[in-house]
Image (cartoon, rainbow, N blue to C red):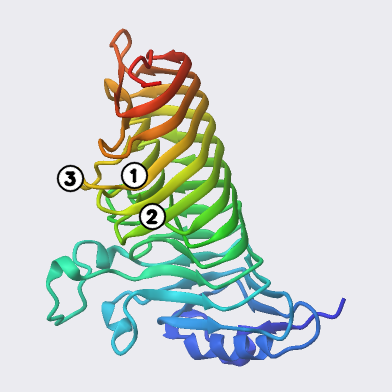
């Protein structure tokens, strides 16, 4: 196999964590992207590299291109690093097929400067409308592989997948303080055939969030906590949304605000269907099982939720209400199945319960008993 290795140090990168190495990285990327032999590699050695916001664009000539991170990539420690640049992203991979991003290295978003106030310096925007950048974005990247890396302290979400097809993510370590706002671990939007495996996610928002236009999502071997669990939605906020064929299994949640959740905005439309949560372990979780179709509390039309199963689930809840299936009055949920779900309260002897609203399905072998499901 012919392979070309392009070390960013050979393109002018300094690697002292203080000098802006963005242009050196882009030069190395351009050379790799234009390389015709099989499997060119952009090598980031074991040093610390400061990158200002930038985009690694495709398409590239090779059917497979490697981005090998041995060292540490850090964001600017001041918002001024975004002056004159788009403020919604930091590192972007755009339109690159056959991309592999891997190694023992690290992305450090140095996001604490954004958490208390996501506005830019001297911004005329209303503070409520300011949004911090996503740390690492993959957009229109098909046959994508991400493995082995550590992601810490993003400005907002750690990893964003948008309009990608055929993605495998494995063995990541994702970490931000529990109090850091909107720091989702992995966000999936309008993407298909996504596999997420054997990763540890501790953060301030959803460990994994799946939003509209996504299908064939397979998640297993995730340790989540602290964080807000694994969520589908919120769907319908922008109008019509669909999510289908989602399988979450062999996952552990510890001390999370929610466990497994489907949330929709009323007023939207579309569907969420063929979703399974299997072999889940809850350890002192708040709100372990939720379907919430009142994420925006009105009584208009909403996204249709159907064919959802919760099976082989065990663990403990920090709240008396361990199961909450709150479906729309106008649409309702259908074919909701609970089987072998055994949840107890973290306080020994304290009773827990399940509630339903217009949820149709069946429950067998559950604790607490779920007697509120409609036929």
Report the side of 39 relative to 216 (left or right).
Answer: right
Residue depicted at 25% across the width and 52% down the height: 267
Q: Name the residue that disc number 2 marks.
A: 184
Residue 224 position within the rendered picture, expressed as x and y whole percent measured from the top left: 45, 41
CA separation, marks 1 and 3? 14 Å
**Quarter containing the N terminus:** bottom right
Q: Name the residue that disc number 1 marks.
A: 263
Comes first in the chain, label 1 or label 3: 1
Mark 1 Cα shell of 10 Å, populated few (<14), some (14-19), many (≥20): many
Report the side of 2 relative to 72 (left or right).
Answer: right
Judged by depth in the image, the label closer to the viewer, 2 or 3, is 3
Image position of 149 with respect to 42: above or below: above
Q: Quadrant of residue 82?
A: bottom left
Whether residue 203 is visible to the viewer of this picture, yes or no, is no
Q: Name the residue that disc number 3 marks.
A: 298
CA separation, marks 2 and 3? 26 Å
Residue depicted at 71% across the width and 86% down the height: 61
Q: Tally the numbered discs.
A: 3
Residue depicted at 40% across the width and 21% down the height: 375
Judged by depth in the image, the label closer to the viewer, 1 or 3, is 3
Q: Secondary structure at mark 1?
A: strand
Residue 371 position within the rendered picture, expressed as x and y whole percent measured from the top left: 36, 14
Residue 372 position within the rendered picture, expressed as x and y whole percent measured from the top left: 33, 18
Image position of 274 with respect to 317: above or below: below
Residue depicted at 23% across the width and 68% down the height: 118
Residue 180 position within the rendered picture, expressed as x and y whole percent measured from the top left: 29, 54
Q: Quadrant of residue 36?
A: bottom right
Mark 3 Cα shell of 10 Å, populated few (<14), some (14-19), many (≥20): some
- Marks 1 and 3: CB-CB under 8 Å? no
Comes first in the chain, label 1 or label 2: 2
Comes first in the chain, label 2 or label 3: 2
Judged by depth in the image, the label closer to the viewer, 1 or 2, is 1
């Amino acid at each position: 196999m012919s392979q070309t290795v392009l070390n960013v140090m050979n393109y002018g990168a300094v690697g002292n964590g203080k000098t802006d190495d963005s242009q050196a990285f882009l030069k190395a990327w351009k050379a790799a992207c234009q390389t015709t032999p099989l499997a060119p590699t952009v090598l980031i050695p074991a040093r610390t590299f400061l990158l200002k916001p930038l985009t690694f664009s495709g398409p590239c000539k090779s059917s497979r291109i490697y981005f090998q991170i041995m060292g540490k990539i850090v964001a600017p420690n001041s918002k001024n690093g975004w002056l004159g640049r788009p403020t919604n992203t930091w590192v972007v991979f755009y339109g690159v097929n056959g991309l592999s991003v891997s190694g023992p290295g690290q992305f450090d978003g140095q996001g604490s400067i954004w958490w208390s106030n996501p506005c830019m310096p001297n911004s005329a925007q209303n503070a409520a409308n300011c949004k911090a950048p996503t740390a690492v974005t993959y957009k229109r990247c098909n046959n994508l592989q991400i493995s082995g890396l550590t992601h810490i302290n993003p400005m907002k979400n750690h990893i964003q997948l948008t309009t990608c097809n055929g993605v495998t993510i494995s063995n990541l370590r994702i970490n931000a303080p529990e109090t850091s706002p909107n720091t989702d671990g992995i966000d999936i939007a309008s993407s298909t055939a996504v596999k997420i495996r054997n990763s540890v996610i501790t953060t301030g928002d959803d460990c994994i969030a799946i939003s509209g236009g996504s299908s064939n999502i397979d998640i297993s071997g995730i340790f989540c906590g602290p964080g807000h669990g694994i969520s589908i939605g919120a769907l319908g906020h922008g109008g019509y949304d669909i999510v289908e064929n989602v399988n979450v299994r062999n996952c552990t949640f510890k001390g999370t605000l929610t466990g497994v959740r489907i949330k929709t905005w009323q007023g939207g439309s579309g569907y969420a269907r063929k979703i399974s949560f299997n072999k889940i372990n809850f350890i002192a979780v708040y709100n372990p099982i939720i379907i919430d179709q009142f994420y925006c509390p009105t009584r208009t039309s909403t996204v249709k939720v159907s064919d959802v199963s919760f099976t082989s689930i065990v663990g403990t809840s920090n709240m008396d209400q361990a199961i909450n299936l709150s479906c729309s009055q106008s649409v309702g949920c259908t074919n909701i199945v609970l089987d072998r779900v055994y949840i107890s309260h973290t306080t020994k002897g304290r009773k827990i319960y399940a509630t339903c609203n217009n949820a149709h399905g069946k429950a067998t072998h559950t604790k607490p008993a779920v007697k509120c499901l409609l036929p």
